[in-house]
Amino acid sequence: MEDSKCISIFDSNHLFCRAYYKLNLQDSKGRNTGGIYGVLSILTSYINKFPEHGIIMCWDKGISAARKKLYSEYKAGRAPVTDEQKLIREDMHTQREVTKKFIECLAVPQIQLNGFEGDEMIYVSWMILKAMGYKIVVVTSDTDMLQLVDSTTDWYDPIKDKMIKYDNFKKEIGVDGDRYIEYKSLTGDASDGIEGIRGIGHVGATKLINKTKRSLLEIKNINTKDKLELKLLNGIEILKRNIKLIDLSTYVDDAAIVYVCDRLTELATINRDMLHNLFDEYDFRVYAAKLHDMIYTYTKLLSINRSVSKRLSEMTKDSSDAIAQSPGTGR
């Protein structure tokens, strides 16, 4: 994907969690800082790798109210049980909020809305930016976000330095991009407490998907002598439920669109003094020593993001209909 008119949307919460569990760092006061340092490292490295991209960052703000209403077991297994788990949850929350302070000082737009998860905010942002004509890279290690890959959207894992595009999607995943939601719905998502159809794993899901160009929900003549097709028949209600849970277009509403537009049209400035104080506070000496270079890097990013903000402001002044009526998936 060419860099011109390209915006990268960061799955901030997911990348924070990856950094939190990978880096065991502490400052001189004994506070854990691995998650904070890791996100800053990922973000700064990415900007240096793709200097012409605009960037926005999307965070969770609680568990999705809409998904929880649809399926009561959604993420039910994530509640902390032991005292150790509760301490980890508290530490993660503390580090996450400090990370947001750093990013605010760097003037990178952050999207978070009560009752919505980061992937839902990514979808709304993606939909708005597509309506504006931007090419998009979704930056995450979460394979759920592969459902957004199309001719103008790439998926990039900064941990593995892996890019998946529309052209190489089937080679990498095994199914076409426009069938990915069905594929994911067959296998489920254990991390989110979404049970798949029993007996259908990734290999079986790939076989079922590639048997027909039609949606599995449209198949009328299922061969009950075929073990896979029989499992599909027995689990068809699970498939229907999972598609609703996994398909991000299910959770778009006007309030979310308005909120994201408002956030993206806000004009931010880099707070050099506060940034310097935070580097000192958390013993990030490497960044403190390179503060001038870092400010220069993020100033260029700020210029790109402000051009996006200006274009969106002009669009919303004329009409919000173009965004609200944009295609759900764009595929």
Image (spheres, grey):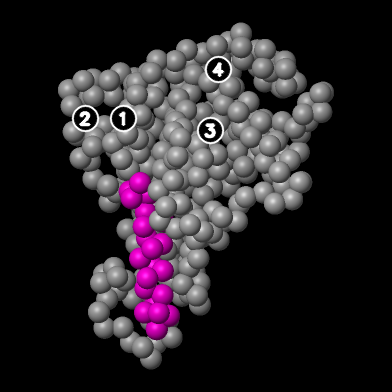
Cα–Cα span, label 3 and label 4: 18 Å
Q: Is residue 247 magenta?
A: yes
> Which residue: 62% across, 50% down?
79
Looking at the image, which residue is at 63% across and 26% down?
98
Residue 166, position as x, y percentages in the image = 36, 52
Residue occupied by mark 1: 258
Instruction: Give the camera-side residue of 219 and 89.
Output: 89
- Residue 149 visible? The answer is no
Callout 1: SS: helix
The foreground one among 106 and 67 is 67
Label 2 element class: loop
Q: Which residues are magenta?
A: 230-251
Q: Amino acid at mark 1?
A: Val
Q: CA distance from mark 1 to mark 2?
A: 9 Å
User: Residue 46, labelled with which disc?
Assistant: 3
CA distance for labels 3 and 2: 31 Å
Q: Which label lies toward us, 3 or 1?
A: 1
Specify which label sits upstream in the sequence, 1 or 2: 1
Q: Is residue 108 magenta?
A: no
- In terms of sequence position, does the residue under pointer 3 or pointer 4 come before the other? 3
Q: Mark 2 vs mark 4: which is more N-terminal?
A: 4
| Residue shown at 48% from the left, 15% from the top | 299
Instruction: Determine the CA span between mark 3 and mark 1.
Output: 28 Å
The reply to whether the C-beta atoms of the residues labelled 1 and 2 are less than 8 Å apart is: yes
- Note whether 258 is above or below 82 in the view shown: above
User: Which residue lies under the disc numbered 4?
Assistant: 105
Q: Quadrant of the N terminus?
A: top left
Indicate which label's residue lies in the foreground, 2 or 4: 2
Which mark is in front, 4 or 1?
1
Q: Amino acid at mark 2?
A: Ser
